[in-house]
Image (spheres, rainbow, N blue to C red):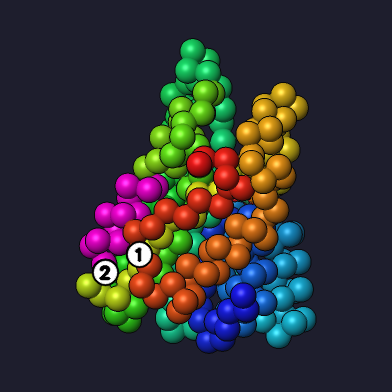
Amino acid sequence: MDFDLTDTTVLVTGGTRGIGRAIVEAFADAGARVAFTYRSSAETADEIVAELGARDVEAIAIQGDVAKPEAAEDAVSAVTDAWGRLDVLVNNAGITRDGLMLRLDADDWDAVLDTNLKGVFNFCKAAYRPFMRQRSGAVINISSVVGVMGNAGQTNYAASKAGIIGFTKSFAKELSGRGVRANVVAPGYVATDMTDAMNDDARQAMLDAVPLGRPAEPEDIAQAVLFLASPAASYITGHVLKVDGGLAM
Ligand code: NDP
């Protein structure tokens, strides 16, 4: 399906690599103006802005840690200052710090919850006022099937991703009267740096459990995000869309 999102302004967290980068590219291909954040990949961020600029796509890269409220405020202000409005917010940035409970320490818990869940809160809070003012907006939060199914060795990650689902449904209920929609995309196993870091046995076990028999490409996730952001999804809110090759069915 081709989506026309011309004149739509989009903010994606964690847009330099993997799924986030594919989401940035997909919105750019659909004609949107795209801002994205990153934590440390400044050089890659500059390259992406230059590549998009060469294709006449308006793009902004913003450095910041999503766990910090001021980073979210800066990013949303950068978008509204440049383009006057924010139409779509995609909370994608996320990390893992895996380990069985016995070895998982409080720092592993805090780092994952602060980035994955508090980051979503920070950006939704920063976007709240522009959305209310405009009486429109679409939020897509990237969870994981691990937040639905659980996974040994990922209590912190699963808690953060399950939290995103409850958060998103509550946010959707709060803002639906203002024309704002909020949905979740829950990917299964996607080929990115994050899954490259898994050990071979864990990766193979995950792959063996995927009925469609292959990992997702980041673009598979990006297309679902694009759909939920588009007018084609104008009657969909509070939904959890699994994009997992059947892993969690
Ligand atoms: P990657 O590790 O490939 O990329 C992560 C991106 O997030 C990078 O752009 C990184 O920026 C950014 N980022 C990480 N931490 C922060 C932070 N504190 N502040 C700002 N930016 C940050 O991850 P994936 O593409 O694999 O995952 C993207 C999302 O999808 C995550 O939320 C993940 O949990 C989720 N997901 C992934 C799955 C998978 O199989 N890969 C499955 C299910 C869900 P920088 O480059 O500067 O470090």
Q: Nearer the viewer, mark 2 or mark 1?
A: 1
Residue under the point 62% across and 82% down: 31
Residue at disc 1, secondary structure? loop
Q: Is residue 39 magenta?
A: no
Which badge, 2 or 1, comes first in the chain's sequence? 2
User: Residue 41 in the image: x percent, y percent?
Assistant: 68, 54
In this rendering, the count of numbered labels is 2
**Which quadrant of the structure image shows residue 129?**
bottom left
Q: Are marks 2 and 1 in contact (CB under 8 Å)?
A: yes
Residue at disc 2, secondary structure? helix
User: Residue 10 in the image: x percent, y percent?
Assistant: 52, 73
Residue 237 disc label: 1
Residue 206 disc label: none
Answer yes or no: is residue 41 visible: no
Q: Is residue 175 magenta?
A: yes
Q: Amino acid at mark 2?
A: Ser
Q: Residues within 10 Å of mark 1 (few under 14, many from 20)?
A: many
Residue under the point 31% across and 54% down: 169
Residue 57 horizontal side relative to residue 184, left or right? right
Answer yes or no: is residue 24 visible: yes
Residue under the point 67% across and 46% down: 212
Q: Is residue 120 above or below residue 99?
A: below
Numbered range of the magenta stretch: 164-176
The residue beneath circle 2 is 176
What's the CA distance linking mark 2 and mark 1? 8 Å
In this view, the residue in front, 81 or 36, is 36
In this view, the residue in front, 100 or 39, is 100
Q: Quadrant of the N terminus?
A: bottom right
User: Residue 209 in the image: x percent, y percent?
Assistant: 63, 34
Q: Is mark 2 within 8 Å of ligand 1?
A: no
